[in-house]
Structure formats: structure tokens, C-alpha cells
Amino acid sequence: MTALDTSVRAKRSLAARIASGAAGGALRAFLLVVGLFWLVPTFGLLVSSFRDPTDIAASGWWKVFTAPAQLTTKSYQSLLEKDEITHALFNTIWITVPATLLVVIIGSMAGYAFACMDFKGRDGWFMAVVGLLVVPVQVALIPLSELFGKIGIFGSIIGVILFHVGFGLPFAIFLLRNFFAEIPRELLEAARLDGAGEARLFATVVLPLGGPAIASLGIFQFLWVWNDMLVALIFSDSGSQPLTVALQQQVRQFSGNIEILAPGAFISMVIPLAVFFAFQRQFVSGVMAGAVK
Amino acid sequence: MSSSVAKAGGAGALPPAPSATPRKSVIGTRPWVAALFLLPALVLLGALVVYPIGYSVWRSLYDSGGSHFVGVDNYVDIFRDDQTLIAVRNTAIWVAVAPALCTALGLIFAVLTERVRWGTAFKLIVFMPMAISMLAAGIIFRLVYEQDPNQGAANAIVTSVHDAFTDASVYPKARPAIGSDLKASGGGSFTTKRTAQAGTPAFLPLVGIAPDKVPGSPQDAKAASTGGDKVTGTVWLDFKLGGGGTKGAVDAGEKALKGVKVEAVRGGKVVASTTSGADGTFTLPKAADGAQLRLPGSNFATAYNGVEWLGPALVTPSIIGAYAWMWAGFAMVLIAAGLAGIDRNLLEAARVDGANEWQVFRKVTVPLLAPVLTVVLVTLMINVMKIFDLIYIIAPQPSQDDANVLALQLFLSAFGGQGNFGAGSAIGVLLLLLVLPVMWVNIRRLRKERQR
């Protein structure tokens, strides 16, 4: 093996090594440029959010490199003084937290039943749930707006939450069922023989063991609901609208509203980005669980 | 699901379910216990997902108000109405281009970052946009694509590259002062009526620019001195803030216009030319004596204003670019994971056999990654069919019809003032039909896993 290695290496002439060194340099330069390219759009909006409206109107955000004194937190201050924005921010929280918790709780109960219980028709029901994974939300917009209208929750936080719970459940059940199925059966059987009820088993064995999967799911559901605009655009009214909807209303007059939109977008991005950086691993494993394994 | 990360994961082709198929329990579960655990989920799924599917199919067969049965008319209209036809066409473009673009970028990034020590940092940067909302991404790119090169970064780059290769026009809005000797002479240029005489400085006053908007840092204009047998003169802004001064004369405080091209024309031919200096003065050689002075149109041509990114022609490609910015990271992470699972000996064997890096990539790496690439493509296709937020946010009102897609059209038909729930439902059902094959493949794969 070693002999082979050296013979292969010996074949690489000096010229080849220089060529590969140059290629490595070009590669690094290319990736550096691409990385910058990926950062610049966000950076531009970030800088804009810290500029005075008159500066924004007068010149591009890149002018701060020559005039750093332009930076100010004025836009953020005046934005957070607007009642409809702070109210919308709270609505986002009031929508996201319950919608996430409900999906995690209801989803893990169902996932547990599908993974660890024996009952008639189990596989059929589970396949039906898997079939629902790809149903587009668009199909439900019209029917649920009529249904919610009839029962009086159209234009309320509850309606928005319910919608997100419904469309979050298939993925939740799928992800958690697959994870719970890997819990050793012997563990569950032993506990059952000891006389533990399913509820106790669920709370004391399955939930603690399912921690990582539940974390992945929770992060996804949280980000999905927090970042949603379409559902809230239709199902909330002016009193219950989240931040995304409140900001969207300012987009039509884009260039005149940058001092609202730029800081607003960043306030709405702070939490998702914090979650992303804090839970990178769970985030990535959630992506994997949904696609390839 | 347009802004949904979770859905991105959930929506695509499924991974194989864990092979640990639950065995029969020794004790067995009492049916009512299982039902209790399942009930909340099944009730909610039934009411919030299954019922809407059925209702949509039924509703799509009725007219906008819901009182008259119209059969498949709503479906026919999707392909007959001009506005929805554009939406159908654009959705097809999106599905054909965006997933392939993201997958290609993801593949390139995944393969290249393997060879760089700071590859993880790079991946983090490219993957990050997945965490933010399509609304935020839309706002970010609306700013990038702003038309004004003084606002939008894309046009700032385009115009500065453009101007580096062509003569930038200097004073697009300037025009001769009323009462001056300069008269329009076609092609945007201005020519003096009188001929220039050596020894008598010419005055070429311009107006039309605010003194504080003169680009650069203009000096005060200076009346040209007599230059012997040469023709001299001054080009300046014959106006100062606060008014005052004599028209046609260089007054103190009036700004010089630097870099204006001045030509001496005799009998329609240019005999000499020069540009004005920092103090606005210019000097032409003796040959210009007795010729007319002309300020050619290139001095006043409208400045190149960059590309109309969000105009009717480019709006869809531009938004696809923003989408790729968001989702290339998704493809990259999945492909990188697939890459990590490849047997390195196969690549090494190909190299030892004399294959170069491109051949190894093309003939070994890509075929080995084919299953992952398929999953990524299918997942992105499903995601792209439902694209809504990005287009709703980035496309300005005048271009919205040109950027239209099915999901946006559904929203506009049903909730955008028309209130046509029949047409909207038909589009919803059409979207569902489009993803049906994937649903079928998912279920079939799951069943196969079970049988093993």
C-alpha cells in the first residue's frame, strides 16, 4: 500500500504540483467571490437599516464605507415606536409559539402510536398521513377561509394557528414516527410488563429519548410559522396580523419605505437567524430527515 | 408552504423509512388507547387538510359565487384566459429552470468546498438564507434590483462596468441658457450661430442643472483669457443659487462645467476639438478661427441607467435568481451529505487510471450522486410549483402580471378583489394534481420498505 502511494506520488512532476497549486488558488478565489456574492445582498439591507432616510434617498448603501458617520439607529427607534409594528411582532410570537407546541405535542402522540403501538389498519393510516406530506397549502386557502368564516375564527390568531397546525402535522408525524421506531422495542416491552401505562411510557421513555428529533421538528415548525406570510395574509385581520403581513403592506412604495422595510426585515430575521446559528446541527438533520437519509 | 423550510424537507421525495419495522407487541395495545393517541392528529388532519381537498374539487365545478354549476369551465378558463396563461407559462419556466439551477449550484459548491479548509464557513453562508422568510429575502432583493444605480447594487455594478468601457455623458440634463448664442443643431448637440474669433473669448453658458447637483467638486468658472491666435472660451453653469448675476457673463460664484467636449465646425466638418478644463475654459488651435463652436450631443445624452431587472422582460429571471440565492444552500447541504457517503476509493481508482479531475467528476462523482440529485430536484420542483411570497414581494405592481405564477394567480383570483372562489379552487386543484405523482411515489416507496 505504502509502495503504491509513493510510486503514485513520484509520478507527479514539479510542473503538475505547481499547476495544482495554482488551481487551488483559483478555487479559493472563486469560492471567496461566491461567498461575498452571497453575503452582499443581506449586508446591503443591514447597512440600509442603519442609515438615515435622507441618506438612503440620496445615495447607495455602499457610501457608508466613505462616510461611516451616516450610521444611526434612528430607523429602528422610529419603527419600534409604531404601535402597529410592535403589535404585529407580538402577534408573530402569539401565533408561532402555540402553533409550534401544538404540532410537537399532537405530532409526537401520533408518531408514538404509529411507531410503538399495534392496532388494526396502522400502516394504512400512516401511509395516508405520508400522502398528505406534499399537499400544497394553496388547496386549503379557499375552503378553510369559508369554514373559518362560518365558525367565526376567520381573521383571528386562532385561525392562523389552526391552519399551521393542520399543515405542520404530516411532516411532524412522519419525522417522529421514523425516529420513535428506532427506540428499542425491548425497552418498551420491559416497561409495559412492569405495568406502565402507555401515557406513562410516552412521557417517561419516548419523549426523553426522542429529544433530538423533537428538537429538529420544533425548529422547523417554528421557522415555518414565524416566516409565513401567505397564510397570515389571508387568515389574519389588521388586529391579528403578524410582522410579515404588516411589512408586506409597505412594499408597494418600496423606495420610499426602505427606512421601514430594512429595519423591519431585520427584526423579523433576528430570531430565525439566532435559531439557525444556535441549532445548526438540528436544523441540518431536520433537512436531511425530510429529504435524504 | 412557500416560505417553508420544514416543507422543503417534508415535501420532497422521501427517505427510506427506518428498516426497524415494529414487531408485534407481546401485550398488544388496547385499541382505544391507540385511538386516543391518534385522535387529535387525525381529527385535525381530516378537518384542515383532507376536507379542504374534497371541498376544493367540488367548489372548482361552480361559478365565482358558488351558486351555479359550471362543470370544468373553470379549468378550461385557466388555459384560455390571457392572465392565467402567463401564470401557467411562468410556472413551467420556474419548474424547468429554478430547481436545475439550484441543484447545479449546490453540486458545484458541495464538490469545491470539500477541498478548502474554510469550506464549513462557506457552507454556513450559503445555507443561511434558508432560515429567513421569503418576505425578508424579497425585501433584500428588491433593494438589490432597484432601478436607480444610486440605490440598487445590481445596477450600480452594471453601470460602473458599462461606464468604464464607454464615454460617460457628462451633463445629461444641461441645456443652453435662453438668450445665449447656442442653438439646438440636431442629435442633441448645440452649435453657436456666430463664428468664433481668435482673440475674442467665446461664452457658452448652460443651465438646467442645480449648482449643488453638479457632479464632482466643481470650481468656480473663470472667463477665458484671450489666447493670441488661438480660439478660447468658457463653458459654465450660468446660474447660481440665490439668483443674481448677469446672464451670459461669468459671474463670481458660478460653477465651471468641466469635461464638456467642444468642437469647431466649418462647413459641416469638425476642424478641431477639445474639452473644457476644471475652470470651464477651453482652448482650440488656430484652425478653429472663424468656425462655429459646437457642443456635441454626447455631452448631454441621458446617462446609462442600468438594466431594468424588474421590468416585464427580466422580472421572472431576476426573481429566479433571488430564489437560487435562498435555495442553493439546501441543495448544497444535501449533496454534500451524499458526497460524504461516496466510497473515496472509487474516485482514487479513477485518478490512478489517469482520469483528470473533470473526468472523475463527470464520470464517477455525478453518477454516484444521481439518487441524491434526484431527491433534491424533486423536492425543489414541488417547492417551486407553490412559489408565491418572493414574486408577490419582488415584482413591482406594473410587472406583476408578467411575473405571475399559478399560486399568485390563485391568490389574486380568490382574495385579490375578484372574489372568484371557483377559479381559485380550480387552480388549487391543478396544483394538487401536479404534485400527485410525487405523493404516489412516496407511498409506494414506503410500502416497499414495509415489505422488506
Image (cartoon, coloured by chain):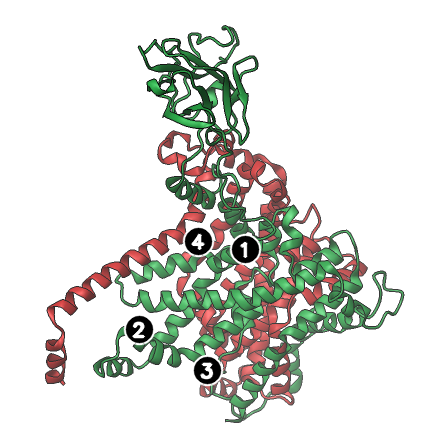
Q: Is residue B134 visible?
A: yes
Q: Which mark is residue B358?
A: 2
Q: Residue furthest front?
A: B267
The quadrant of the image that shows the N terminus of chain A is bottom left
Q: Nearer the viewer, residue A9 or B156?
A: B156
Residue B120 position within the rendered picture, expressed as x and y whole percent measured from the top left: 32, 62
Measure the C-alpha gap from mark 3 to mark 4: 30 Å
Q: Which residue is mark 4?
A: A274
Q: Chain of mark 4?
A: A
Q: Which residue is mark 3?
A: A182
Residue that appears at 11% across and 83% down: A2
Measure the C-alpha gap from mark 1 to mark 4: 26 Å
Q: Crowding near pointer 4: few (<14 within 10 Å), some, many (20+)?
A: few
Measure the C-alpha gap from mark 2 to mark 3: 41 Å
Residue that appears at 26% across and 75% down: B356
* Mark 3 residue type: Glu
Q: Residue furthest right?
A: B68
> Which type of secondary structure does the marked residue at label 3 adopt?
loop
Q: Chain of mark 2?
A: B
Residue A66 position within the rendered picture, expressed as x and y whole percent measured from the top left: 35, 32
User: Do the residues bearing badges 3 and 4 touch, measured as CB atoms within 8 Å?
Assistant: no
User: Do the residues bearing badges 1 and 4 touch, measured as CB atoms within 8 Å?
Assistant: no
Q: Chain of mark 1?
A: B
* Mark 4 residue type: Ala
> Which type of secondary structure does the marked residue at label 4 adopt?
helix
Same-chain check, marks 2 and 3: no
Colour in which chain A is shown? Answer: red
Measure the C-alpha gap from mark 1 to mark 2: 31 Å
